[in-house]
């Protein structure tokens, strides 16, 4: 299936980028001075540890993969949503996705990291590749484009229908 977005929904736990629990966070390292401007550190990769989300333009600190996203608060936000409707992700059965703490992925300043966070992962499905078998290459993209038009008119109902 073609996936335009991934959503991580917070379930439980805390993580921090140093040993002090004062920096407990759901998605990064809350209030830690070095990363206040880009406090998010949860990364999605494939099974070879290639970064899928966040998109490169959000990453502000390449060594540890610290990033920022509009509106998202690293301590209080219930959800973390990554989207890429220009280049939908093709997910197939048994494909592995990994949820990383960026510092751990990069083996950078990871020795003092602590904690664990559990999340549910949802995919925003914009098409099934089998449904368009025989169609022209790029059919998924045009489906994404048509969906974007729908989003403008009925965002809430589509959002409910497509999260799986
Ligand atoms: Ca650290």
Image (tube, grey):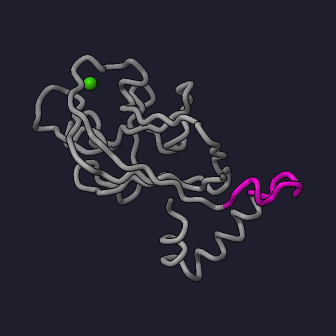
Vertical side of 8 occupied by 151: above or below = below
The residue sitting at 69% across, 63% down in the picture is 144
Taking 155 as reference, is 60 left or right? Answer: left
Taking 53 as reference, is 90 left or right? Answer: right
Ligand 1 rendered quadrant: top left
The residue sitting at 58% across, 37% down in the picture is 94
- Residue 81 appears at what percent x and percent y? 44, 54
Most extreme residue toward the front, as rendered?
93
Vertical side of 4 occupied by 157: above or below = below
- Residue 113 appears at what percent x and percent y? 24, 25
Residue 136 in magenta?
yes
Taking 149 as reference, is 110 left or right? Answer: left
The residue sitting at 42% across, 32% down in the picture is 65
The residue sitting at 38% across, 39% down in the picture is 42
- Residue 53 appears at what percent x and percent y? 51, 42
Occupied quadrant, residue 108: top left
Magenta region? 127-140
Is 89 or 72 nearer to us in this picture?
A: 89
Residue 73 in magenta?
no
Most extreme residue toward the bottom, as rendered?
153
- Residue 139 appears at what percent x and percent y? 80, 58
Taking 103 as reference, is 7 left or right? Answer: right
Occupied quadrant, residue 33: top left
Q: How many marks?
A: 0
Occupied quadrant, residue 28: top left
């Amino acid at each position: 299936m073609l996936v335009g977005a991934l959503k991580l929904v917070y379930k439980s736990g805390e993580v921090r980028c140093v040993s002090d629990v004062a920096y407990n966070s759901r998605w990064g390292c809350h209030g830690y001075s070095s990363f206040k401007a880009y406090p998010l550190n949860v990364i999605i990769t494939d099974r070879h540890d290639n970064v899928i989300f966040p998109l490169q333009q959000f990453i502000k600190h390449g060594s540890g993969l610290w990033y920022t996203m509009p509106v998202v608060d690293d301590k209080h936000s219930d959800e973390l949503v990554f989207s890429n409707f220009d280049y939908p992700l093709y997910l197939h059965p048994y494909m592995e996705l990994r949820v990383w703490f960026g510092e751990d992925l990069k083996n950078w300043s990871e020795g003092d990291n602590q904690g664990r966070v559990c999340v549910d992962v949802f995919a925003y499905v914009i098409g099934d590749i089998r449904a368009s078998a025989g169609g022209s290459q790029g059919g998924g993209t045009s489906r994404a484009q048509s969906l974007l038009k729908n989003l403008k008119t009925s965002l809430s109902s589509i959002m409910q229908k497509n999260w799986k």
